[in-house]
Image (cartoon, grey):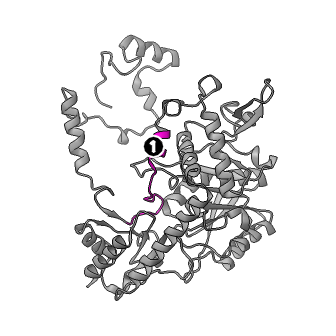
Amino acid sequence: MGKRRSTAHPYIPNSARAAKEAMLREIGAASEDDLYEDIPEALRFRGRLAIPEALASEPELRRHVEGLLAKNRSCAESLNFLGAGCTQHFVPAVCDEINARAEFLTAYAGEPYDDHGRFQSLFDYASLMGELLNMDVVNVPTYDGFQATATGLRMAARITGRSEVLVSRAVSADKLSKIRDYLRPRIRVQLFDFDPVTGEPDLASLEEAISNETAAVYFESPSYLGVIPSCGDDVSATAHDVGALSVVGVDPSTLGVLAPPADYGADIVVGDLQPLGMHMAYGGGHAGFIATRDEPRFVLEYPSRLFGITSTSVEGEYGFGDVAFERTSFALREGGKEWVGTAAALWGITAGAYLALLGPQGMRELGETILQRSHYAAKRLARIPGVRAPRFRGAFFHEFVVDFSRTGKSVTRIHRALLRRGIFGGKDLSSEFASLKGCALYSVTEVHTKGDLDRLADAIEEAVA
């Protein structure tokens, strides 16, 4: 593990030799190496890390960091059509203003003594999301949509007492990996197919896979491949016929123009808040939501915090706070439904500000704008010789699969040509889906103008010529 530091470090607690020796004695360890005894020797690093010399001043640090950032090419100076789970939307200035306020930004876990309006803001967020989703109960956000999905499936397993879930193959490899890791070892994950022509859930495949052991069926609207399922009610009915729950992942930015999953039988709705006022960032700008009906069998299985409203001892006054707090690991460390730690509550407040700003009419206009522009883009690309857009016949919202296989050019080659023109092409799907070799997932939102879409089409036409 390398030579141990013998002096105290100014920024590392308990790093003085006497403090470390006292801690080792307390736990019965002879040395620090005893703490790593479970790690095989072959995996331990015994050399010296190639750490550069310390920077001597703040100006040097600033110059160094700015130099690193200058190597990046961001969406600010490039035209971006990447989505696949993190999508470029317009972020109103009020969202940044609200989430930067000290009473929200510094309120970590948040208790009554340091509330300063945080509880009410999260209650308002949950209320707005509930209206958008046509559901009664919405949680304080989890880390991201991946965790919300996995947690929703765990909730279904606890509610039904079963240990198997069915997941549509039309999900991203990353999300599927998270689901499997989060559900193991007690809950099995089985897959059912999507129709190769429409991209919608394959009902025959679902009916073949489902059984009385199935706790939940999970599908998305739109799916990872961009397709909006027209058979959502049939999928939910198939789940309900065997006593399973319907768990649906949804993009909230679609719900100004599309029916919410609750309208086609969803019992648990999950997703990511990123489209609602959050900037894209490296590892940030994500928060997961879970929504259900207001029934004890659902409410008591939420692992995360739920905020409600109640009257106080002062007539006409109301307060906000936790609902059924004993469910959580905050109340019962070893008895919580799942472990709950640092979440993404600040993004819930941001999403609440976004929804309050747009309102029902604004969400409808957002959805209509995205639909119009994404369909224009697909039609424009479809006119290019050898390009098939969209790849699937199913309806789509803002993302659609573009098939370049008939052009004789690989997705990688085409995207390199686009990069030289200052354009980020879509997500290459070749490695995730064997049936989609030569295909890419393109994302079009309200930030794209007709000129942007024409520029993309012209650049692709040049790249495949």
Q: Main secondary structure of the magenta part?
A: loop
Q: Residue at x 60, y 61 (%)?
A: 361
Q: Secondary structure at mark 1?
A: helix
Looking at the rendering, in which quadrant would you find the C terminus?
bottom left
Q: Is residue 22 left or right of residue 46?
A: right
In the rendered image, residue 103, in percent from the top left (x then y), is placed at 53, 30
Relative depth, front residue between 363 and 206: 363
Tell me which segment is drawn in magenta: 81-98
Label 1: few (<14), some or many (≥20) within 10 Å?
some
Which residue matches tag 1? 96
Q: Residue at x 27, y 56 (%)?
A: 73
Relative depth, front residue between 158 and 363: 363
How many numbered tags mark residues here? 1
Q: Is residue 49 left or right of residue 128?
A: left
Q: Residue at x 73, y 45 (%)?
A: 301
Q: Quadrant of residue 80?
A: bottom left
Q: Residue at x 66, y 67 (%)?
A: 259
The answer to whether one can see residue 185 in this image is no
Q: Is residue 325 above or below residue 461?
A: above
Q: Quadrant of residue 67?
A: top left
In the rendered image, residue 25, in percent from the top left (x then y), is placed at 48, 14
The answer to whether one can see residue 96 in this image is yes
Q: Is residue 16 left or right of residue 459?
A: right
Residue 205 magenta-drawn? no
